[in-house]
Image (tube, rainbow, N blue to C red):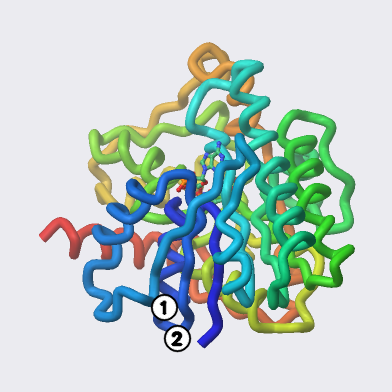
Amino acid sequence: MPTILITGGTGLIGRNLTRLLIEKGCRVIILTRNTKKANKKIRKAFSSIQDPTLISTAAWSVRNQTIDVDAIGEADYIVHLAGAGVAEKRWTARRKKEIVSSRTKSSALIVKALSENSNKVKAVISASAIGWYTPTPISNQQTVTRIETDPPDQGFLGETCRLWEESIGQVTLMHKRLVKLRTGIVLSNEGGAFKSFKRPIRWGLGTILGDGRQIISWIHVEDLCRIYWEAINNEQWSGVYNAVAPAPVTNKVFILALARKIKGNFFIPIHVPSFVLKLTLGEMSIEVLKSANISEEKLRRAGFQFLYPSVEAAFDQLTAISRRDAK
Ligand SMILES: NC(=O)c1ccc[n+]([C@@H]2O[C@H](COP(=O)([O-])OP(=O)(O)OC[C@H]3O[C@@H](n4cnc5c(N)ncnc54)[C@H](OP(=O)(O)O)[C@@H]3O)[C@@H](O)[C@H]2O)c1
Protein backbone atom coordinates (compact mmCIF):
# COMPACT_ATOMS: atom_id res chain seq x y z
CA MET A 1 0.00 0.00 0.00
CA PRO A 2 1.81 3.19 -1.12
CA THR A 3 1.82 6.19 1.20
CA ILE A 4 1.19 9.58 -0.36
CA LEU A 5 2.15 12.73 1.54
CA ILE A 6 0.04 15.71 0.42
CA THR A 7 1.09 19.24 1.34
CA GLY A 8 -1.94 21.53 1.61
CA GLY A 9 -4.07 18.39 1.47
CA THR A 10 -6.88 20.05 3.45
CA GLY A 11 -7.76 22.25 0.44
CA LEU A 12 -10.16 21.76 -2.45
CA ILE A 13 -7.91 19.62 -4.66
CA GLY A 14 -6.30 17.81 -1.70
CA ARG A 15 -9.62 16.61 -0.26
CA ASN A 16 -10.80 15.29 -3.63
CA LEU A 17 -7.44 13.68 -4.34
CA THR A 18 -7.38 12.05 -0.88
CA ARG A 19 -10.79 10.48 -1.64
CA LEU A 20 -9.48 9.02 -4.93
CA LEU A 21 -6.22 7.79 -3.39
CA ILE A 22 -8.05 5.97 -0.60
CA GLU A 23 -10.33 4.34 -3.21
CA LYS A 24 -7.20 3.23 -5.08
CA GLY A 25 -5.84 1.57 -1.94
CA CYS A 26 -3.28 4.17 -0.81
CA ARG A 27 -2.54 5.61 2.61
CA VAL A 28 -2.58 9.41 2.82
CA ILE A 29 -0.70 11.75 5.15
CA ILE A 30 -1.82 15.37 5.01
CA LEU A 31 0.92 17.86 5.79
CA THR A 32 -0.71 20.90 7.35
CA ARG A 33 0.04 24.05 9.31
CA ASN A 34 -2.63 23.16 11.86
CA THR A 35 -3.18 19.48 12.66
CA LYS A 36 -6.10 20.16 15.02
CA LYS A 37 -8.09 22.00 12.33
CA ALA A 38 -7.02 19.49 9.68
CA ASN A 39 -8.17 16.51 11.77
CA LYS A 40 -11.56 18.17 12.20
CA LYS A 41 -11.85 18.76 8.43
CA ILE A 42 -10.85 15.16 7.72
CA ARG A 43 -13.42 13.74 10.16
CA LYS A 44 -16.11 15.80 8.41
CA ALA A 45 -15.02 15.08 4.83
CA PHE A 46 -14.23 11.39 5.25
CA SER A 47 -16.74 10.23 7.86
CA SER A 48 -17.67 7.20 5.72
CA ILE A 49 -14.12 5.80 5.60
CA GLN A 50 -14.07 2.70 7.78
CA ASP A 51 -10.36 2.47 8.54
CA PRO A 52 -9.22 5.71 10.24
CA THR A 53 -5.54 4.75 9.92
CA LEU A 54 -5.75 5.33 6.13
CA ILE A 55 -5.67 9.11 6.56
CA SER A 56 -3.50 10.94 9.06
CA THR A 57 -2.05 14.41 9.50
CA ALA A 58 1.47 15.68 10.12
CA ALA A 59 2.64 19.17 10.98
CA TRP A 60 4.91 21.63 9.24
CA SER A 61 5.53 25.32 9.52
CA VAL A 62 6.61 27.00 6.32
CA ARG A 63 7.24 30.21 8.24
CA ASN A 64 9.56 28.53 10.79
CA GLN A 65 10.91 25.98 8.29
CA THR A 66 10.04 22.98 10.48
CA ILE A 67 8.59 19.69 9.28
CA ASP A 68 7.59 16.30 10.69
CA VAL A 69 10.47 14.20 9.36
CA ASP A 70 8.71 10.91 10.19
CA ALA A 71 6.09 11.80 7.58
CA ILE A 72 8.86 12.33 5.00
CA GLY A 73 10.33 8.94 5.95
CA GLU A 74 7.00 7.17 5.47
CA ALA A 75 6.13 8.71 2.09
CA ASP A 76 6.48 6.86 -1.23
CA TYR A 77 5.26 9.92 -3.16
CA ILE A 78 4.79 13.61 -2.35
CA VAL A 79 2.02 15.71 -3.84
CA HIS A 80 2.78 19.41 -3.34
CA LEU A 81 -0.36 21.57 -3.31
CA ALA A 82 0.29 24.06 -0.49
CA GLY A 83 0.04 27.75 -1.20
CA ALA A 84 -1.87 30.85 -0.12
CA GLY A 85 -5.08 31.26 -2.18
CA VAL A 86 -4.43 33.37 -5.27
CA ALA A 87 -8.00 34.69 -5.58
CA GLU A 88 -8.85 34.74 -1.86
CA LYS A 89 -7.83 38.32 -1.03
CA ARG A 90 -6.99 41.55 -2.81
CA TRP A 91 -3.43 41.61 -4.17
CA THR A 92 -1.73 44.03 -1.81
CA ALA A 93 2.08 44.03 -1.80
CA ARG A 94 1.95 41.93 1.40
CA ARG A 95 -0.50 39.41 -0.04
CA LYS A 96 1.55 39.04 -3.21
CA LYS A 97 4.61 38.29 -1.09
CA GLU A 98 2.64 35.62 0.79
CA ILE A 99 1.33 34.06 -2.45
CA VAL A 100 4.91 33.65 -3.69
CA SER A 101 6.68 32.73 -0.45
CA SER A 102 4.05 30.17 0.66
CA ARG A 103 4.95 28.28 -2.51
CA THR A 104 8.70 28.82 -2.81
CA LYS A 105 9.47 28.44 0.91
CA SER A 106 7.28 25.33 1.19
CA SER A 107 9.10 23.84 -1.82
CA ALA A 108 12.45 24.71 -0.20
CA LEU A 109 11.37 22.99 3.00
CA ILE A 110 10.47 19.80 1.11
CA VAL A 111 13.79 19.88 -0.75
CA LYS A 112 15.70 20.37 2.51
CA ALA A 113 13.77 17.58 4.29
CA LEU A 114 14.43 15.17 1.41
CA SER A 115 18.12 16.00 1.30
CA GLU A 116 18.66 15.75 5.07
CA ASN A 117 16.59 12.64 5.86
CA SER A 118 16.73 9.12 4.51
CA ASN A 119 13.59 8.52 2.49
CA LYS A 120 12.02 6.33 -0.19
CA VAL A 121 10.20 9.05 -2.10
CA LYS A 122 10.00 7.98 -5.75
CA ALA A 123 8.36 11.05 -7.24
CA VAL A 124 7.10 14.52 -6.42
CA ILE A 125 3.97 15.80 -8.17
CA SER A 126 3.58 19.55 -7.83
CA ALA A 127 0.75 21.91 -8.62
CA SER A 128 1.45 24.87 -10.83
CA ALA A 129 -1.00 27.03 -12.75
CA ILE A 130 -1.86 28.23 -16.24
CA GLY A 131 -1.10 31.69 -14.85
CA TRP A 132 2.36 30.77 -16.20
CA TYR A 133 1.28 31.79 -19.70
CA THR A 134 1.08 35.12 -21.49
CA PRO A 135 -2.58 35.96 -22.23
CA THR A 136 -3.82 34.79 -25.63
CA PRO A 137 -4.46 37.83 -27.87
CA ILE A 138 -8.26 38.17 -28.26
CA SER A 139 -7.93 38.82 -32.04
CA ASN A 140 -6.68 35.28 -32.78
CA GLN A 141 -7.46 33.50 -29.52
CA GLN A 142 -9.23 30.58 -31.21
CA THR A 143 -6.10 29.61 -33.14
CA VAL A 144 -3.27 30.52 -30.73
CA THR A 145 -2.87 27.94 -27.96
CA ARG A 146 -0.25 27.93 -25.23
CA ILE A 147 1.93 24.85 -24.82
CA GLU A 148 4.26 23.62 -22.09
CA THR A 149 7.46 24.89 -23.73
CA ASP A 150 6.18 28.49 -23.92
CA PRO A 151 8.07 31.00 -21.73
CA PRO A 152 6.48 32.43 -18.57
CA ASP A 153 4.48 35.65 -18.68
CA GLN A 154 6.23 38.72 -17.20
CA GLY A 155 3.22 39.57 -14.98
CA PHE A 156 2.72 38.66 -11.31
CA LEU A 157 1.21 35.19 -11.84
CA GLY A 158 3.70 34.25 -14.55
CA GLU A 159 6.56 35.20 -12.24
CA THR A 160 4.92 33.38 -9.30
CA CYS A 161 4.60 30.17 -11.32
CA ARG A 162 8.18 30.47 -12.56
CA LEU A 163 9.56 30.81 -9.02
CA TRP A 164 7.26 28.02 -7.76
CA GLU A 165 8.32 25.56 -10.48
CA GLU A 166 11.98 26.54 -10.09
CA SER A 167 11.88 26.01 -6.30
CA ILE A 168 10.35 22.53 -6.46
CA GLY A 169 12.59 21.73 -9.46
CA GLN A 170 15.46 21.23 -6.97
CA VAL A 171 14.13 17.72 -6.15
CA THR A 172 15.41 16.51 -9.52
CA LEU A 173 18.97 17.13 -8.23
CA MET A 174 18.23 14.24 -5.83
CA HIS A 175 17.13 12.14 -8.82
CA LYS A 176 13.45 12.22 -7.88
CA ARG A 177 10.97 12.12 -10.73
CA LEU A 178 9.13 15.44 -10.85
CA VAL A 179 5.80 16.20 -12.55
CA LYS A 180 4.44 19.76 -12.58
CA LEU A 181 0.78 20.21 -13.42
CA ARG A 182 -0.09 23.66 -14.80
CA THR A 183 -3.69 23.62 -13.74
CA GLY A 184 -6.64 25.50 -15.24
CA ILE A 185 -9.71 26.73 -13.34
CA VAL A 186 -10.91 23.76 -11.29
CA LEU A 187 -14.64 23.04 -11.42
CA SER A 188 -16.02 21.61 -8.19
CA ASN A 189 -19.17 22.15 -6.13
CA GLU A 190 -17.04 22.26 -3.00
CA GLY A 191 -15.41 25.62 -3.63
CA GLY A 192 -13.12 27.67 -5.83
CA ALA A 193 -14.18 29.66 -8.90
CA PHE A 194 -17.13 27.42 -9.84
CA LYS A 195 -18.99 28.27 -6.64
CA SER A 196 -18.48 31.98 -7.34
CA PHE A 197 -19.76 31.54 -10.91
CA LYS A 198 -22.89 29.77 -9.63
CA ARG A 199 -23.82 32.23 -6.86
CA PRO A 200 -25.30 35.09 -8.98
CA ILE A 201 -26.95 32.54 -11.30
CA ARG A 202 -28.92 31.21 -8.34
CA TRP A 203 -30.25 34.78 -7.95
CA GLY A 204 -31.23 34.78 -11.64
CA LEU A 205 -28.23 36.72 -12.97
CA GLY A 206 -25.88 35.38 -15.64
CA THR A 207 -22.89 37.61 -14.87
CA ILE A 208 -20.57 37.81 -17.85
CA LEU A 209 -17.19 39.32 -16.97
CA GLY A 210 -16.09 42.25 -19.15
CA ASP A 211 -17.11 41.64 -22.77
CA GLY A 212 -17.07 37.87 -22.09
CA ARG A 213 -14.84 37.10 -25.10
CA GLN A 214 -11.90 35.90 -22.96
CA ILE A 215 -11.30 32.13 -23.08
CA ILE A 216 -11.45 30.09 -19.88
CA SER A 217 -9.32 26.95 -19.70
CA TRP A 218 -10.96 24.81 -17.06
CA ILE A 219 -10.87 21.25 -15.70
CA HIS A 220 -13.34 19.11 -13.75
CA VAL A 221 -11.92 18.26 -10.31
CA GLU A 222 -12.44 14.52 -10.89
CA ASP A 223 -10.36 14.60 -14.09
CA LEU A 224 -7.69 16.64 -12.32
CA CYS A 225 -7.42 14.06 -9.53
CA ARG A 226 -7.20 11.29 -12.16
CA ILE A 227 -4.31 13.24 -13.74
CA TYR A 228 -2.54 13.38 -10.33
CA TRP A 229 -3.10 9.62 -9.97
CA GLU A 230 -1.62 8.98 -13.42
CA ALA A 231 1.34 11.27 -12.62
CA ILE A 232 2.00 9.29 -9.43
CA ASN A 233 1.83 5.89 -11.10
CA ASN A 234 3.17 6.33 -14.58
CA GLU A 235 6.96 6.40 -14.49
CA GLN A 236 7.01 7.75 -18.03
CA TRP A 237 5.46 11.01 -16.86
CA SER A 238 8.02 13.68 -16.09
CA GLY A 239 8.23 17.46 -16.47
CA VAL A 240 5.39 19.89 -17.14
CA TYR A 241 1.84 19.06 -18.27
CA ASN A 242 -1.07 21.42 -18.77
CA ALA A 243 -3.96 20.10 -16.67
CA VAL A 244 -6.89 21.53 -18.64
CA ALA A 245 -9.87 20.03 -20.47
CA PRO A 246 -9.78 19.79 -24.28
CA ALA A 247 -12.61 22.27 -24.89
CA PRO A 248 -11.93 25.71 -23.43
CA VAL A 249 -14.78 28.19 -23.97
CA THR A 250 -15.26 31.94 -23.73
CA ASN A 251 -16.47 33.41 -20.44
CA LYS A 252 -19.80 34.27 -22.11
CA VAL A 253 -20.37 30.73 -23.46
CA PHE A 254 -19.40 29.30 -20.05
CA ILE A 255 -21.75 31.54 -18.03
CA LEU A 256 -24.71 31.24 -20.40
CA ALA A 257 -24.39 27.43 -20.60
CA LEU A 258 -24.19 27.19 -16.80
CA ALA A 259 -27.11 29.58 -16.31
CA ARG A 260 -29.27 27.57 -18.76
CA LYS A 261 -28.34 24.36 -16.97
CA ILE A 262 -29.29 25.76 -13.55
CA LYS A 263 -32.16 28.12 -14.41
CA GLY A 264 -33.49 27.05 -17.84
CA ASN A 265 -34.59 30.33 -19.46
CA PHE A 266 -35.23 32.08 -16.14
CA PHE A 267 -32.17 34.28 -15.85
CA ILE A 268 -31.03 37.69 -17.03
CA PRO A 269 -27.59 37.88 -18.72
CA ILE A 270 -25.67 40.96 -17.55
CA HIS A 271 -22.17 42.20 -18.32
CA VAL A 272 -20.01 43.35 -15.43
CA PRO A 273 -17.94 46.10 -17.10
CA SER A 274 -14.16 45.81 -16.93
CA PHE A 275 -13.83 49.07 -14.98
CA VAL A 276 -16.13 47.72 -12.22
CA LEU A 277 -13.99 44.58 -12.00
CA LYS A 278 -10.87 46.74 -11.81
CA LEU A 279 -12.42 48.81 -9.01
CA THR A 280 -13.58 45.80 -6.98
CA LEU A 281 -10.73 43.36 -7.62
CA GLY A 282 -7.82 45.73 -8.27
CA GLU A 283 -4.87 44.11 -10.05
CA MET A 284 -6.48 40.66 -9.76
CA SER A 285 -9.06 41.75 -12.37
CA ILE A 286 -6.35 41.13 -15.00
CA GLU A 287 -6.73 37.43 -14.27
CA VAL A 288 -10.49 37.23 -14.81
CA LEU A 289 -10.32 39.39 -17.94
CA LYS A 290 -7.37 37.72 -19.64
CA SER A 291 -7.83 35.08 -22.30
CA ALA A 292 -6.18 31.71 -21.71
CA ASN A 293 -6.41 29.20 -24.53
CA ILE A 294 -4.23 26.41 -23.17
CA SER A 295 -3.45 23.17 -25.00
CA GLU A 296 -4.04 19.75 -23.38
CA GLU A 297 -2.38 17.93 -26.27
CA LYS A 298 0.61 16.70 -24.24
CA LEU A 299 -1.73 15.03 -21.74
CA ARG A 300 -3.68 13.34 -24.54
CA ARG A 301 -0.46 12.17 -26.20
CA ALA A 302 0.50 10.66 -22.82
CA GLY A 303 -2.69 8.58 -23.06
CA PHE A 304 -4.93 10.48 -20.66
CA GLN A 305 -8.66 10.21 -21.37
CA PHE A 306 -11.05 12.81 -19.98
CA LEU A 307 -14.32 11.89 -18.28
CA TYR A 308 -15.49 15.49 -18.73
CA PRO A 309 -14.09 16.86 -21.99
CA SER A 310 -16.78 19.56 -22.52
CA VAL A 311 -18.43 22.12 -20.25
CA GLU A 312 -21.78 20.44 -20.98
CA ALA A 313 -20.50 17.10 -19.62
CA ALA A 314 -18.92 18.82 -16.58
CA PHE A 315 -22.04 20.92 -15.82
CA ASP A 316 -24.35 17.88 -16.21
CA GLN A 317 -22.39 16.01 -13.55
CA LEU A 318 -21.84 18.95 -11.18
CA THR A 319 -25.43 20.20 -11.23
CA ALA A 320 -26.78 16.63 -10.83
CA ILE A 321 -24.59 16.19 -7.75
CA SER A 322 -25.64 19.52 -6.19
CA ARG A 323 -29.36 18.71 -6.86
CA ARG A 324 -28.87 15.30 -5.21
CA ASP A 325 -27.07 16.86 -2.20
CA ALA A 326 -29.80 19.53 -1.85
CA LYS A 327 -32.49 16.80 -1.41
N1 LIG B 1 -8.35 25.42 -7.47
C1 LIG B 1 -7.93 25.90 -8.64
O1 LIG B 1 -8.74 26.35 -9.50
C2 LIG B 1 -6.45 25.91 -8.96
C3 LIG B 1 -6.03 26.26 -10.25
C4 LIG B 1 -4.68 26.29 -10.55
C5 LIG B 1 -3.73 25.97 -9.58
N2 LIG B 1 -4.16 25.62 -8.34
C6 LIG B 1 -3.12 25.36 -7.31
O2 LIG B 1 -3.28 24.06 -6.75
C7 LIG B 1 -2.94 24.10 -5.36
C8 LIG B 1 -4.12 23.52 -4.56
O3 LIG B 1 -5.29 24.24 -4.92
P1 LIG B 1 -6.60 24.22 -3.99
O4 LIG B 1 -7.70 24.83 -4.81
O5 LIG B 1 -6.78 22.89 -3.37
O6 LIG B 1 -6.16 25.29 -2.89
P2 LIG B 1 -6.79 25.56 -1.44
O7 LIG B 1 -8.16 24.97 -1.33
O8 LIG B 1 -6.63 27.02 -1.18
O9 LIG B 1 -5.82 24.74 -0.47
C9 LIG B 1 -4.45 25.03 -0.37
C10 LIG B 1 -3.92 24.54 0.96
O10 LIG B 1 -2.62 25.12 1.13
C11 LIG B 1 -2.38 25.38 2.49
N3 LIG B 1 -1.98 26.80 2.64
C12 LIG B 1 -2.75 27.92 2.51
N4 LIG B 1 -2.02 29.02 2.76
C13 LIG B 1 -0.77 28.60 3.05
C14 LIG B 1 0.42 29.28 3.44
N5 LIG B 1 0.47 30.60 3.57
N6 LIG B 1 1.52 28.51 3.69
C15 LIG B 1 1.50 27.16 3.56
N7 LIG B 1 0.37 26.47 3.24
C16 LIG B 1 -0.74 27.18 2.98
C17 LIG B 1 -3.69 25.15 3.27
O11 LIG B 1 -3.52 23.96 4.05
P3 LIG B 1 -3.36 24.00 5.67
O12 LIG B 1 -4.18 25.16 6.16
O13 LIG B 1 -3.91 22.67 6.12
O14 LIG B 1 -1.91 24.16 5.93
C18 LIG B 1 -4.74 24.96 2.17
O15 LIG B 1 -5.71 24.00 2.51
C19 LIG B 1 -2.68 25.56 -4.99
O16 LIG B 1 -1.29 25.79 -4.88
C20 LIG B 1 -3.28 26.34 -6.15
O17 LIG B 1 -2.60 27.56 -6.44
C21 LIG B 1 -5.49 25.59 -7.99
Kind of residue sitting beneath label 1: Ile
Q: Which mark is residue 116?
A: none
Q: Secondary structure at mark 1?
A: helix
What's the CA distance linking mark 1 and mark 2? 5 Å
Give neighbour class at mark 1: few <14, some 14-19, many 20+ (Cα, 10 Å). Answer: some
Residue beneath the point at 15% across and 56% down: 326
- Residue extending farthest left: 327
Residue beneath the point at 60% across and 61% down: 69
Residue indicated by mark 2: 25
Question: In the figure, residue 169 lies in which quadrant?
Answer: bottom right
Q: Secondary structure at mark 2?
A: loop
Residue beneath the point at 19% across and 61% down: 325
Where is residue 82 shown, x and y percent of the image? 57, 48
Q: State yes or no: Cβ of the residue under disc 2 lies below 8 Å from any atom of ligand 1.
A: no
Q: State yes or no: Cβ of the residue under disc 1 lies below 8 Å from any atom of ligand 1.
A: no
Residue indicated by mark 1: 22
Q: Is residue 194 above or below residue 309?
A: above
Where is residue 34 shown, x and y percent of the image? 42, 45
Q: How many labels sit on residues? A: 2
Can residue 137 be spotted in the picture? no
Give neighbour class at mark 2: few <14, some 14-19, many 20+ (Cα, 10 Å). Answer: few
Residue beneath the point at 53% across and 37% down: 85
State yes or no: discs 1 and 2 in contact (Cβ < 8 Å). Answer: yes
As drawn, is 287 to the left or to the right of 302? Answer: left
Where is residue 61 shown, x and y percent of the image? 56, 42
Looking at the image, which is closer to me, 249 or 39? 39
Kind of residue sitting beneath label 2: Gly
Where is residue 143 shown, x and y percent of the image? 79, 53
Looking at the image, which is closer to me, 32 or 140? 32
